[in-house]
Amino acid sequence: MAYSTCQWSVARAELRRARDQEALDPDTLSLLAMCEWWLGEVPSAVTLAEEAFRAQLTAGRVEAAARGALDLALISYTAGEAGLGSAWFARARRALAGRERSVAGGYLVYAETVSRLETDGELTADGGGAEEAAQAAAQLTTLAETFDDPALRAFAGVLAGLSAVLHGHVQEGFDLLDEAMLTAVGGRLPAMWAGDVYCSVLHLCEALGDLNRMRRWTDAMESWASPLSRRFTYYGVSRVHRLQLSSAEGDWDRVVAELDDRSRSLAPAHGWVAGEGFRELGDVRRLRGDVAGAKSAYAAARDLGIDPQPGPALLTAAAGDGFGALAQLHASLATRRRFEGGRLLLAGVHVAVLVGALPDARSFAERLTAIAQWYDSPGLRARSAHAHAALALAAGQPEQALTRLGEALEVYRQQRYRYGVGSVHELLARAHLARGERGPARAEHATALAVYRSLGAQPDVDRLTDRGRTPGGLTGRELEVLAAISAGATNKQVASELVISEKTVGRHLANIYRKLEVSSRTAAAAWARRHGIGS
């Protein structure tokens, strides 16, 4: 039923009046619950749906009750209530005992398979998830033919598509997903289930770094959701995804102005996407130098069950604790599914290079290359090239860096990833400078600076201008450590003064020696005195 907001409001008012006069039958209760859900009144919708579920069971309408339980499971999961969602899945499963070969049974197969795909570790063929999806797709195809049900046919196509993508057959998989979603566009797939499919696919596109495909699917979601209801949960979801794309395209003013409110209003109904919105907002605030605002947004993402890394780790690195940032990234990668590692691994390479941990940098780059080869996504290939270019520069191989940077730049431009373009031009400047090509280096430096200025990426602007330069390229924390040792402080005294561990002091010293190209405490202290540090 693709009614407008006004029509859903009128229907709700009429049903509420009828309920005040007499008890509603289970189907009418379910319709009232659906009105509330369409109008964004999720708690009320859940209460009514629970009442309808009990009424359906009392009336002996087991399959209808199971469908209601599955709707409640989906609502609970999208709201971030995984425990409640699992409980409703269990109720649906109990209700359908002995009736698994049914339309409702097909919904259960689909919902449980997708739930496991989204929560269970590694999703490669050898991880088992992709094979399970393929088997469930075959089962749903049989049920769809038996009952001639278009929704089950679409679910089969979705699972077959996800299985193909996770097996590394990305184009084939998205072709199957595109075909399956024609059912949603035609209005033959229940709205909350169609919206969930859109969300799953958009998350996959974002994780694979495929911004062009994400744009196409966001366009499709907006075209489907916008005419239905502006208070419809998935209209809000489509707006958050659109703002994620705006972030990539460099429209950071719009992101800062809108994304906080969009994410907060969406959180009660769809905590997962709202959390992704807060993560994106945190990244933009961080890149604009709003550290407190970034931390606040990252905290909001965590509260909704979203790991906001690598942003918090990059904040830690910018504050001078590169090894602490590296530890955060290792911890986060240990909990991420394979295809979600692309963004973290590129950040990991940059942080590892910053602190001179080249074995970690190489490991991150190799893992990223393996993921890019498996999924064959343009965004992942660009990130891999970007990572290897940074590693090549750190290893004194500017020629190799130039080649890989050219590969990354071409894709970032095609994908309209504005900050990525600026980052590549900055590394191109360094590569040309390492080859003694001062003219090209100045041109690339100017291009990077222009991109950063257009975005409002003030920390990057400061870093590329005199305001951002510190003696020896040391961070603020490294300058503090250097000032203390140049005054004769021991590691223990420095740790006490700066409220850090002695081990962290040692790491900072190692980093200082590397940047200043000295090999002893005495030489570092002498360098500090020459540059007026600690004097």
Image (cartoon, rainbow, N blue to C red):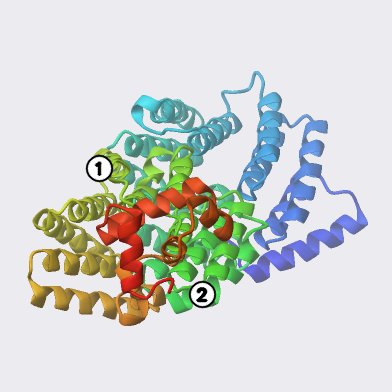
Q: Secondary structure at mark 2?
A: helix
Left or right of 435, for residue 445: right
Left or right of 429, for residue 175: right
Q: Tell which residue pokes out farthest to the right in this image.
A: 21
**Quarter of the image where the N terminus is located:** bottom right
Q: Judge by depth and name the residue closer to the eye, 347 or 354.
A: 354
Q: Is the Cβ of the residue at disc 2 closer than 8 Å to that at disc 1?
A: no
Q: Secondary structure at mark 1?
A: helix
User: Mark 1 is on which residue type?
Assistant: Thr
Q: Which residue is mark 1?
A: 369
User: Mark 2 is on which residue type?
Assistant: Val
Q: Which residue is mark 2?
A: 256
Residue 16 in the image, given as x and y percentages of width and height = 83, 60
Q: Quadrant of residue 145?
A: top left
C-alpha distance separating marks 2 and 1: 33 Å
**Circle 2 crowding by C-alpha within 10 Å: few under 14, some 14–19, many from 20:** some
Q: Earlier in the sequence, mark 2 or mark 1?
A: 2
**Total numbered badges shown on the rendered structure:** 2
Q: Judge by depth and name the residue closer to the eye, 501 or 6.
A: 501
Residue 413 in the image, given as x and y percentages of width and height = 23, 67
Q: Quadrant of residue 264?
A: bottom right
Q: Which residue is pictured at 47% across the width and 73% down the height? A: 289
Q: Judge by depth and name the residue closer to the eye, 164 or 189.
A: 164
The answer to whether residue 262 is seen in the rendering is: yes
Quick check: 249 above or below 80?
below
Q: Which residue is pictured at 63% across the width and 22% down the height? A: 99
The answer to whether residue 473 is seen in the rendering is: no
Left or right of 109, for residue 394: left
